């Protein structure tokens, strides 16, 4: 996966997360995605792995705030993808891609340990991925279908061009 593909996939997930708010499924998240980092990062990690990419949910601290993001591999390099950094100010892009050595990100829990931490540390229900799991699963299934249709269409275009 190259950086452009990584950014496009992350934007697709961010759009889905924003739609949960705009459709009224949750009213607890801020328009800048404050309070949505766990749900967004969980969904992004699942989305990337469903497409065969290496990705993992991370819970930790960002500039002294409890926060979640995704650790992934892009262009054969480890990276951090943060699709809710916008909650920390207008200087952040919708999709932040940074080096994992960037000291503002301090990992505490990864993968299943991060998911367990949401429960053990009593994260508010509206900030836990399991609260929205039906919507997340529907998004993942619909998205896989879109990719399958796109890949089939593209394959047919290439196949017909060869004839």
Image: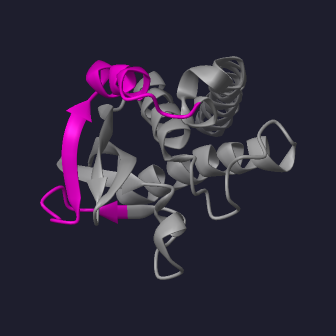
**Between 69 and 152, which is closer to the camera in this rendering?**
69
What's drawn in magenta, residue-wise?
Answer: 97-124
Location of residue 109 (image quadrant): top left
**Between 93 and 28, which is closer to the camera in this rendering?**
28
Q: Give me the residue at 47% from left, 82% from top.
A: 91
Q: Is residue 6 above or below residue 62?
A: above
Location of residue 48 (image quadrant): top left
Name the quarter where the N terminus is drawn.
Answer: top left
**Between 90 and 61, which is closer to the camera in this rendering?**
61
Q: Is residue 92 above or below residue 133?
A: below
Q: Is residue 53 above or below residue 144?
A: below
> Horizontal and vertical percent for residue 116?
35, 19
**Between 35 and 161, which is closer to the camera in this rendering?**
35
Q: Give me the residue at 27% from left, 22% from top.
A: 113
Any magenta on residue 41?
no
> Horizontal and vertical percent for residue 98?
28, 63
User: Would residue 75 be visible to someone looking at this image?
Assistant: no
Q: Is residue 116 left or right of residue 12?
A: left
Q: Is residue 111 left or right of residue 16?
A: left
> Horizontal and vertical percent for residue 24?
86, 42
Q: Is residue 17 above or below residue 160?
A: below
């Amino acid at each position: 996966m190259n950086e452009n593909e990584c950014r496009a996939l992350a934007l697709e997930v961010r759009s889905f997360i924003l739609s949960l708010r705009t459709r009224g499924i949750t009213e607890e998240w801020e328009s800048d995605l404050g309070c949505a980092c766990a749900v967004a990062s969980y969904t992004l990690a699942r989305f990337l792995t469903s497409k065969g990419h290496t990705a993992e949910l991370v819970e930790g601290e960002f500039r002294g705030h409890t926060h979640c993001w995704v650790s992934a591999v892009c262009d054969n390099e480890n990276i951090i993808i943060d699709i809710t950094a916008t909650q920390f100010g207008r200087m952040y892009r919708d999709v932040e891609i940074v080096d994992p050595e960037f000291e503002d990100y301090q990992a505490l829990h990864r993968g299943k340990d991060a998911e367990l931490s949401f429960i053990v540390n009593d994260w508010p229900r509206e900030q836990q991925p399991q609260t929205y799991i039906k919507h997340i699963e529907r998004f993942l299934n619909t998205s896989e279908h879109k990719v399958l249709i796109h890949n089939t269409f593209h394959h047919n275009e290439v196949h017909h061009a060869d004839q």
